[in-house]
Amino acid sequence: MSQPFIEARNVGKQYGQDIILERVNIQVQEGEFVTLVGASGCGKSTFLKMILGTEQASSGELLLNGQAMPNEPGPDRGIVFQQYSVFPHMTVLENVVAAKGFQKASLSGYLFGKEKQQAKDEATEVLTQVGLSHALNRYPHELSGGMKQRLAIAQAVICKPRILLLDEPFGALDPGIRADMHRLILDLWKKHKLTIFMVTHDLKEGFYLGTRLWVFDKLRHDPHAPNAYGASITYDLPVGETQDSLYQEITDQIRPDSMATEQTETVL
């Protein structure tokens, strides 16, 4: 097998005395789509931030193409949050052009002349891909929640990242819009040959999207010191090959209280 695109070697993360992650060991090839599930506070978003470069490992090694993961964000890694990171005073088109401009080394990120026109052309193409070609001149306050999230995705994709990080991007959307967003993100994944990591609290969503699912949980617990041990990846599953009994086991693990009486549904 070729060298992993991303590799974690015994990675741990802690803040002071609080241990968030420990003994994380994974290998990911370029082009995979990994979904991350687990109880709130178990380190899923922290791991995403470590890939982004806004957080660093406290122990172990996190590698990108065999080299240490850069300790700051770069254009090779895009991220989309649940809360829309758009500029309210800019139109849809201007928002995406601005995202392209921020790739520049200058403080302002302003584009001029041919460079600006090229960015507009690229932004229009990306906005067409995400279904916003009819809304180029609208402002964010004129958009629905689903349209704002499409805009945030366009901002990330125009920078042509190799890695796209999604931190619960569809959590605030209703089921019908979420289904549309699922189709969109799968289309973009294939079209742009992205490597995607997506945090979700929806186990069904985690099994539906992508190629691989990770479950974050603590293997060791101390009731007197809840932060004495960190979470690790307790399941690493190929999507679509999970039995109902294992699906229920994972459901009970990540939502033991609210899901106790819920009947398991078959995951296709």
Image (cartoon, grey):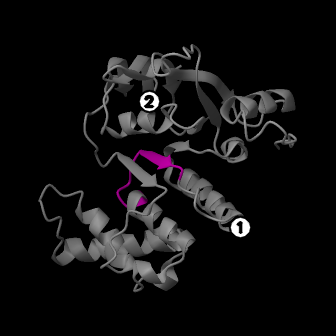
* Disc assigned to residue 176: 1
Q: Which residue is drawn at 21% across and 71% down?
A: 115
Foreground pick, 40 / 66? 40
Q: Residues within 10 Å of mark 1 (few under 14, many from 20)?
A: few
Foreground pick, 70 / 203? 203
Report the amino acid beneath label 2: Phe
Please report the bounds of the magenta region as a residue range. 157-168
Q: Is residue 124 magenta?
A: no
Percent x, y of residue 202 = 67, 46
Q: Which residue is drawn at 48% across and 17% down?
A: 225
Percent x, y of residue 122 = 37, 70
Q: Which residue lies furthest to the front in this view?
A: 224
Q: How crowded is mark 2: few (under 14 residues within 10 Å), some or many (20 or more)?
A: some
Task: Classify residue 163 by image quadrant.
Answer: top left
Q: Is residue 231 above or below residue 179?
A: above
Quadrant location, the N terminus: top right
Mark closest to the chain's N terminus, 2 or 1: 2
* Disc assigned to residue 5: 2
Q: In front: mark 2 or mark 1?
A: 1
Distance (Cα) linking label 2 and label 1: 34 Å
